Image: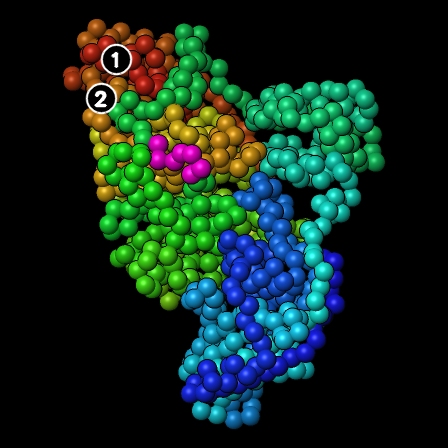
Amino acid sequence: MTGQVSMKLSIKIFTFGFAVLYILLGCTGADRVKSHRPIDVWVFRSVLDKKPRMLTVALDSQLYVAYDLARCTLYKAWKGGVTMEGAPYTSKKNIQPTSWGTTYISDSPLQQQWVVERNGKKETSKITNKGYSFKDDQVYLEYLLVLSTGDSMLVKERPEYVKDPTGKPGYERWFKTVGVPQGTSISLQQNNEFFKLASNGISVKTDYFDILPEQFPPDPKASYDHLGRMWMEESDCFTCHDIDKPDVGPAFTQIAQRYPNNGETLVKLSQKIRQGGSGVWGQNVMNPHPQFSERELKMMLGYVLSLKNEEDTVAYKPFVRDYLVAAEKHEATPGHGQPLEAVHPSYDLTTLHGGDFRPKVGGLAFLPDGRLLFTIWDTEGGVYILDGFQGGDSTKISTKRIAAGLHEPLGIEVVDGNIFVVQKHELTQLIDLNGDDVIDEYRAICNTWQVTEDFHEFAFGLDYDEGYFYITLSMAMRLLATEKQKLDRGRTIKIAPDGSYERINYGLRTPNGIGRGVDGELFVTDNQGQWLPANKLIHVKKGEYNGMAWGLLDSLQEPPKMVPPTLWLPQTEIGNSPSEPIMMKDGPYKGQMLHGDVSHGGIKRDFLEKVNGNYQGAVFRFTQGLAAGVNRLCWGPDGALYIGEIGMVGGWSWKEKKYGLQRIKYNGEPTFEMLAIRAKPKGFEIEFTQPLENNSKIFWADFYITQWRYDPTEDYGGPKLDFEQLTVKATNLSQDRKKLYLELPGLKKEHVVYLRIPDNLRNADGQNLWSSEAWYTLNAIPEK
C-alpha cells in the first residue's frame, strides 16, 4: 500500500425517526453519485490482506471499502483496488488477494467494536454476520446482536460513495436498527469515539476525504527479494513444490542440497524443466515448460540453488515408488495397465460447454423445473443457470449468471426449491426475492467454523439429508511451525438450519468429495499427502480418526490408530485427487458407486461389500474421454450423469485442462468388464457383466496379482510395504460362466490387492474386456 495516513476531512452525522427520514435526508449536504460501479462483480468475498472472512465493496473508482465479517466491522476504506491472486484466480498457491492504493480509513489504529448499553450500563453481547442483500444497485449488510438475556437486535448497514458540494469524495454509512428493547442503545466505538445508532430508527454517518491522484497497482517485483522467486510465483512452480517440505515434488531446499551451484547444473536442470518427465525424484510427473526463456530459467534456478544450507552438498537418495511390472503377456494398453482414453461404451457423451462458456465447475445441482445450477471456481465466484440443454440441441443452450462474488464456491444443493452454496468460509442461502432469476439476498446460514487465511483451507460439499447439511473442511498447508491447525480443520461437519454444527470425524487432509453412497451412507474422498500414503474413499462415522495427524492435540504422545479406509486408491495408478462420490443409478452397475478425480482424470467405479460389519471392496477404471479433470457429479432428471470439470495450471489438473461441463447417459449397449469382486475366505470371486465365451481357456499364470500394505507417516505419500506377488492355486467358473473364483494362498488382511486378469478374455459375442484391472482393499477376510 502506498499510504496509511487517514485522509478524513470532515464528518457529518444524522439520526432520524422513520417518519422524517426522507424529508431530512436531502439536507445532509451529500450528493449520492449516480451509480457507476468500477468493476462487474463489485461486492465479493475473499481473504484480503491475510484476513479471512472479508467482504469487499467496490463503490466507486474513488472508494473501495472492506468489512471484516467475523467482527462485523469496517476493515478499511481506500482508493485503489484489489489484486486477485491465489489458486482459483491466478493458479498460485501461496498468495491471496491483497488491497492496493491509499488508505482513507483503516481499522488497525481504530479497533472498531460494537457496544451495547442498557439503562446506562454496558451489556454483554455477541454479534454475527447474517449476510447481505441488494436493492436498487446498493448493498445492505445485516448483523445480529444477541444479548446475554437472549434478546436479539438487527443492525442493517448500507455503504455508499458520495461527494460533497466541492467534489470531495465521501463514504456514507446508513444504519437501521430493529428490535432494540426500551432503554437499550447500540454504538459503534472507534478508540474513544462513539457513534450512537438511533434505536429502532435510521442513522447516517458520512466521512469526507481529500481528493487523491490516480492510484496504480504496485510493481509485482516489489514484493519479492529475488526476481527468480517472482517468476516462480507467476508460473506453476509452487503448485507441486514447497520451499522446505516435500509436496507432489521435492522441496526446493532438497534440490539445492543435491546439486552444486554451477553452470553444469543450470544447463542440466534447465533442460529437465523444459522437457518435464519423472523418475528423478519418484514417479510423479513434472509438466514440461517450453515457454521459459534461458534468462528466466537461470534466474529461477539461481533462487532455488541459493537455498542450499551452509553444509557441503551430500548424496541424496530420492524416494522412488515401487511400480508394478506387468506379466510378460500383458502388454500395457488403455484399460490394461494404462489409464483409459475413451468414453465408456455403454454411455453417450454430450458436451454442454463451448465457445466463451468455459466453466471451472465447483458445484452442480438441479432446480425443481429441471434447469441446472452450477458454481464456478474463479475470480467471478458465480452461480449460473444452464437451460435449453434438455432436448439435445446445443444451439438452444443458454446460461445466466444469478449470483456472483462468492468465495471459492465448491458445493451447491437445492432443498425444497431453496438454493444453498458452501463458500470457503460460509454456508450461504441464495434468495431470489422477486422471481427474476437474480439473487437478491445472500443469507449466512453458518459462518463460525474455524478458519485462517491459508489458501488450502477449502470447504467442500454439499450434502443434505434429513434436515442437516454436511461439508468437509481441509487442513491448512502453509502454517508456521509456531502455528497450530484450527480444531475444525480436517473434519466432516454436520450443520443444522440454525447454523450450529457438530464435528463428525477427524484426520482428513483434502477431502474434496462428499456424497451419499451404498445404503444411503455418507462417504468422502481424501487426497494423498502427509500422513496419507495413498488416496482414499472413506465411510463417514462419528468420532473416527482418518489418519492425518496435523491438528491433533499436543497432549497426545502419538497419533491414534487410523481407521482403515473403505478403499485405498493408489497414487498415480487409480487416483491422484479423488473428488465427489455418488451412487450409480443405471445399467448393471446400479447400486454401486462412482467418484471423479481432478488430477488423475476420468471417473472410477466402486464396488462395495460389507465384511464383519464394515465396507470394503474394489475400485475399477470406468470412463475417460472427458474435457478436464472431474470435480463434481450430479444425476439429472433426464437420467443422465452431469459432470462438472475443473483444473488449475500446474498440479491440480488433468493434462493441464481447466474447464468443462458434460454429461453421459446410459445407452443400453452392453460392455464386457468385471462387475464386482467379492472377498472369500481363501480368495476372490470375480463377477463379469456378461458370460465368458464357451471356449475360454483360463491359465493361472496369466493372472498378475500382488498385495501390499500402507503405513501412514509424516512424509508426503508413502511406499508399498511388504509388497509381494501372489500365485493363483485354483480357479472355478460358475455354470452361467459369469463368476470366476480364484483361490489365492497367502492373502493378508489390511492389505491392498491388485488384480490384473488376462486381457484376452472375451464374452460370448467375442467382445474384449473394457478393463482388466482392479484394486481391492482387503481390510478383513470373511470367515465364510
Note whether 777 is above or below 432 in the view shown.
above
Q: How is the image coloured?
A: rainbow
The quadrant in which residue 8 appears is: bottom right
* Nearer to us in this view, 338 or 749: 338
Q: Position of residue 147 (x, y in %)?
A: 47, 81
* Nearer to us in this view, 757 or 138: 138
Q: Amino acid at mark 2?
A: Pro
From where the camera sits, is residue 232 visible?
yes
Along the horizontal axis of the image, is 209 left or right of 530? right
Along the horizontal axis of the image, is 327 left or right of 53? left
Along the horizontal axis of the image, is 273 left or right of 770? right
Q: Position of residue 567 (x, y in %)?
A: 39, 35
Q: Quadrant of the C terminus?
A: top left
The residue tagged 1 is 767
In reply to whether residue 174 is colored magenta, the answer given is no
Q: Quadrant of the N terminus?
A: bottom right
Tell me what residue is drawn at x 22 percent, y 22 percent.
Answer: 669
In reply to whether residue 352 is colored magenta, the answer given is yes
| Disc 1 and disc 2 in contact, CB within 8 angstroms | yes
Q: Bin the neighbour count of mark 1 within 10 Å (Cα to Cα): few under 14, some 14-19, many 20 and up.
A: some
Along the horizontal axis of the image, is 310 left or right of 238? right
Note whether 450 is above or below 383 in the view shown.
below
Q: Which residue is most to the front?
A: 166
Q: Which residue is most to the left?
A: 735
Task: For marks 1 and 2, give the CA distance.
Answer: 10 Å
Residue 670 disc label: 2
Tell me what residue is drawn at x 37 percent, y 48 percent.
Answer: 400
**Highlighted range, magenta:** 351-357
Q: Position of residue 102 (x, y in %)?
A: 70, 61
